[in-house]
Every structure is written in structure tokens, then in C-alpha cells.
Amino acid sequence: MVVLSQRQDSMCSEAFANLIHSVLTASSVGKQHTSLDKWSLFPSLTTSKREGAVTELQIAEAVALVDTLQNWTVLDKIIIPTKNPDKKFVFGKGNFQVLTGETFMETQSRILKERELKIRNALEKLRRKRSLLRTQRRKREFPIISVMGYTNCGKTTLIKALTGEAELQPRDQLFATLDITAHAGYLPSHMAVIYVDTIGFLTDLPHNLVESFSATLEEVAYSDLIVHVRDVTHPETILQKATVLSVLKNLNLPSHLLDSMVEVHNKVDLIERYKPTEENALAISALHGHGLEELKQEIEKKILTATGRKILTVNVNLEGPQLSWLYKEATVQEVEVMPEDGTARVKVIISSSAFGRYKNLFPNSKIFMS
Ligand SMILES: Nc1nc2c(ncn2[C@@H]2O[C@H](COP(=O)(O)OP(=O)(O)OP(=O)(O)O)[C@@H](O)[C@H]2O)c(=O)[nH]1
Ligand SMILES: [Mg+2]
């Protein structure tokens, strides 16, 4: 059993010490080299905050502290190595101190500064990326799908599975993704789309960070579809859903984006025979690839509606210019040549405006709606 004393300085209340203590004891004390489950921290943090026992600053401190922990070893005291090999936190009986000469306050303030710098750098990169996405949207070449959800719900894992992009790095860590990034993928009808990986949401985000996070989400307004990923194995999954929906509402997104949102229940490999209670929600395991075909079908259906694209089959004369026109102006999916009459049946995905032009240019071409 480890006892944490109240810190002498004004920053540390007994509640804060208890908080850290409960996290440490909750995470199987006694095992050697146990990796710390950050999620065990969050229920105590949110409850303590609601009860007024700790402040937002202290929560930010605790999050920053826990974020630096990699593994820990329990002997008669708990020794927590930080990312810096020369510095360790020691939680012993009746006291806790930092081994390095650096005071606990100094360490905390350094951690917060490092974290702030990381976020500032990420925001700077984002600003540059955002204008890229905006240009892409203006060109309207590829439909854009924003993948959103609470931090750690599996957004990056899902995009990796949908696009096959090997270099994407999902991590069991809060805010693994600090950047919005775009990734190309294909829907079942071979339509190319762009998936946008976004920063995870967090309940009770410290005030000074709210603005920065909302700024990163502005881009979502430019997408054609939102996929809301949920970790349905998380004990607070319902609160997380409410947080995500309320943040999305405050972003003043066009109402069709909110109405057409696809809700995905992820990590169902961890729950036996999972059945979503929400109507229209799709159960998947991004990690094991379950349910992804159904999800792609659903995304395709919604993207076709959202972007005014149609899938149709047209009959073209192979001697005329129709086929090359279609290759240029639409996405050709299949060409079935009829050698007996020199024509071909061509299956295409075409935007409403291109379809209008096609009908004007080739009024005699036979069209089969699918
Ligand atoms: N068992 C299981 N684990 C999953 C699944 N999907 C994701 N994970 C794990 O959940 C953790 C977080 O995954 P990420 O894809 O990084 O989550 P994220 O939503 O991008 O997280 P942030 O970028 O921090 O917001 C990783 O350890 C993944 O391996 C799943 O379907 N099943
Ligand atoms: Mg991520």
C-alpha cells in the first residue's frame, strides 16, 4: 500500500494527492513494469472536478504528469521514470519527491511548458494544412469524409484500415493525433475519397485549450460527411458521445452534415455478440477489420447523396467521343464492349452538372439508371 502525503506548497491539496494515489492503486500495484492505463485516471478526474475537489489547473497537471509516465516498478516505493532518463518521480511512504534536485513544482511547470510547445507546434502545422484542405474542397475533385470522435476511440486505426496506409500510427495514448491529416481511400464503387483524421475530443478540456481545439475543427465544415467513431467498450462511452455531439453543435456546421452523420461503434471485438442500441449505428472492429465493408457501403450511399453524384450505366458508340469524354469528366467504373454493334455499356459515377452536360452533348446516348 502506498500513502501519499499532502504536498507542502499551495498547489497540492489533499484531494490532488488522493487523486494521484487512487490512480496508482487502481492500476495493479505490485506488478513489475506495468504500463499505466491513463483511462483509469479519467473517471476520478471528472468526478473530483464535478465535486469541486480539484481545479482545472490541477487536472491539466495530472494529465501532463500521467502523460509522461511510461512504466513503473513497485518495490517498497513507487518509482516512476519520466521520458528524461535522469529524472524520476518517487512516491514513497509519507512523501513524494522528484529525484534530480528539481522541485516538484519545477518539474510540473517544465512538463506543462513542454506540452504547450508541442501543442503550439502542432497548431502551426495545422494552419498550413488547413488551407490545403480548403483548396482541395474548392476544386471539388474528391469527396471529403471527416472522421471524428473522442480521444482514443480508434479514429486513426479506422482510417488506416480503410485506406491501407501503413505509416499511420494509432497509439494507446491521449491525443495521439495532434494534427488533422488527409488520407486517400476507395469506396466499393472505386470512387476515390479523402478521409480526414481529426484530433480527439475530451470532456472538461482546460479552458485555455478549448479555443485551439475548436480552431482545428473548423475544417470539418468543408467536408461532405462526418463519421463519428465511438469506443463502445469505454465505461463513459455515453458521456463521450454527448461531448462530441455538443462540440459539433457549437461548431455551427451546416445542418445536413449533422443530419447525415454516420455513427460507428468501434472495438466490438472486445464485447461478445455486441448489438448497437442506436438505430443506424454500425458495429465494427477497426483493429480486426470487422464490419468495414458495410461501413464503406454506407459511406458511399451518403457521399453519393451529399455530393449529388449518381452511378449510372450509359450506352456509348465506340467510334464517337463519348467514352473519352466520360473518362475525363466522370469516374468510369466498368466498360463492357458489345463487338456486334460497335458500342459499349459504361458504368460511371458522375456529378449532376457533368450529367447535364453529357445529356446535352450526346442526346442520343441511351442511359440506364442504376
Ligand atoms: N480492441 C480494439 N482496439 C482498438 C480498436 N480500434 C482501435 N483500437 C486501439 O485503441 C487505441 C487508440 O487507437 P487510435 O486509432 O490511436 O485512436 P484515436 O481515436 O486516433 O486517438 P487520438 O488520436 O488520441 O484521438 C490503440 O491502442 C488501438 O490499437 C478495435 O477495433 N479493437
Ligand atoms: Mg488518432
Image (spheres, rainbow, N blue to C red):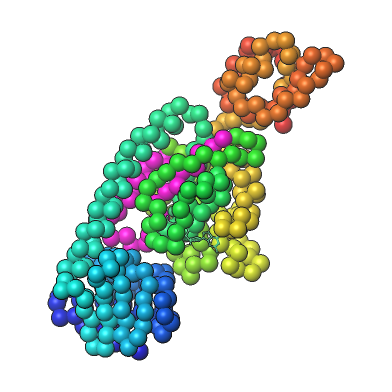
Which residue sits furthest front?
A: 86
At a point 73% along the width and 14% down the height, the residue shown is 318
- Give the x, y percent position of residue 171: 44, 59
4 or 103, which is in the foreground?
103
Relative horizontal placement of residue 33, taking residue 11 as reference (left or right): right
* The magenta segment: 192-221
Relative horizontal placement of residue 323, taking residue 212 as reference (left or right): right
Residue 40 position by quadrant: bottom left
Q: Is residue 120 visible?
A: yes
At a point 64% along the width and 63% down the height, the residue shown is 275
Relative horizontal placement of residue 357, taking residue 45 as reference (left or right): right
- Give the x, y percent position of residue 27: 41, 78
- Report how many numbered discs are placed on residues in the image: 0
At a point 41% along the width and 85% down the height, the residue shown is 30
Q: Is residue 56 visible?
A: no
- Give the x, y percent position of residue 142: 51, 32
- Quadrant containing the N terminus in the rendered view: bottom left
- Give the x, y percent position of residue 214: 33, 48
Which residue sits furthest right?
A: 340
Q: Is residue 85 above or below residue 306?
A: below
Residue 284 position by quadrant: bottom right
Q: Is residue 143 above or below residue 180?
A: above
Membership of 333 in magenta stretch:
no
At a point 32% along the width and 60% down the height, the residue shown is 205
351 or 23, which is in the foreground?
23
Residue 370 position by quadrant: top right
